[in-house]
Amino acid sequence: MRRARFRTVTLAGALALALAACHGGSGSSAGGGTTSSVPTSSAATTTTTVTAAGPAIAFSTQGDELDAYPTTRPFATQVVVPSADADRDGVDVSGQICFDPTDPTRFVAVDRTAAADAQVGWGVFDLSGSTLGKLGASETARLVPTFQPSADAPTPFGCAFLPDGRLLTTDLGNRTGGNANGQLVEWFPPLDRERVPSCKVAVTLAAPEGVLVDADHVLVAESRGRGITSFLTSTLPSAASPAGGCSQRDATHALIAFGVVHTSLVANAATLGLANPAVLVRAHNGDLLVSTPRTGAITEITADGHFVRRVLAPATSALGTRPFANGTPVGLAVAPDGALYYADAGFERRGATVVPGVRAGTIRRIAFVGNRPLLPEVVGSGLHDPEGLAMWEAQ
């Protein structure tokens, strides 16, 4: 790990009112890693009112910043970590957000602040406060792996914690062409020290995005056509050493694991429209929910990979110059009441390229009546490329 310049951010009054009680149709996108310039305008307005957080707070990355939303009305917003462009002490965060089960006030998100200096990786943050409007975050470390040689710039995205505090992260590698060289990397705690030992679990994944620790398995969404890959947790390295199952070296001379057992979770992924997944999350009933931004769908499957239903139906037409009404879901999170939140990146097509639309992203939620999903409701709008989403409850 390379040492970074760490920052403390507390924005007690930075709240933005968001639109509420809206719904639409379906969406579509092409995989992660596409970027565009960040516009300076936003549909949101601001207020200095401090709003109670309710039973849980939803965190989301968008526009190189970290935002927080309540899970009860009114759907206000706090910028918890501003971008480096907006604040000299800010951090350019993106990707998934993962909270440490051994320390629920610690979370990890992608930190791209020093990307120009080859320091792109994962920031480790300590969260302070428990109500919206009084949240703060202090970055204590940055985890920077070696990346496989690729035609594309390094694109970290996914993260997940094992119950004992070990951290798993993904980076996409080649996103649209070339050999599959995405990585799954395991980091060994404590994470807030000068050098954090790590071991690469896999280095030939097809644009891996979201990661989910699900009981005895680690599930990785390989967004470049392979579907969902399941790694047996008991075969993961226990330490960055030969005795811990990590003694080989990859092309960058970094440690890589041996003996890790993995298999495909969904046997007929292409038939079910799950060949290009982005993120997975566990529903309250034990099933898995999977986002597929390429088709705008959210699919429910059983823990062993069998199709259940579409919670959000896929688009019925090709993606055009404007996003679909129900958006292009990427990040997913489930609230304590069972409602599903999703980060709609607002993708649209410009020529042959799929990019985030200008402040076209939204945060939406799908409530359930009985077991029936309702139409999506807008929680936040006017966002730039929202990707990650996580649910947090104050202890």
Image: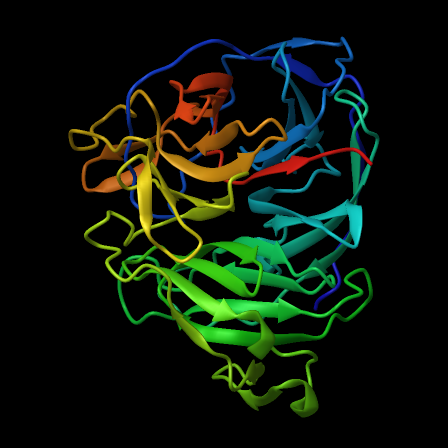
- Residue located at (33% from left, 52% from top): 306
Quadrant (top left, top right, bottom left, bottom right) of the C terminus: top right
- Residue located at (48% from left, 39% from top): 331
- Residue located at (39% from left, 24% from top): 372
**Residue 10's x, y, as percent?**
81, 30
Above or below, comparing residue 229 to residue 243 in the picture = above
Quadrant (top left, top right, bottom left, bottom right) of the N terminus: bottom right
Whether residue 34 appears in this view of the structure is yes
Above or below, comparing residue 351 to residue 159 in the picture = above
**Residue 357's x, y, as percent?**
36, 28
Q: Quadrant of residue 375?
A: top left
Taking the view exactly as shown, the residue that stands out farthest to the left is 317
Q: Quadrant of residue 391?
A: top right
Judging depth in this view, the residue of 236 and 170 nearest the camera is 236
**Residue 138's x, y, as percent?**
80, 43
Whether residue 139 appears in this view of the structure is no
- Residue located at (77% from left, 53% from top): 5
Judging depth in this view, the residue of 74 and 90 nearest the camera is 74
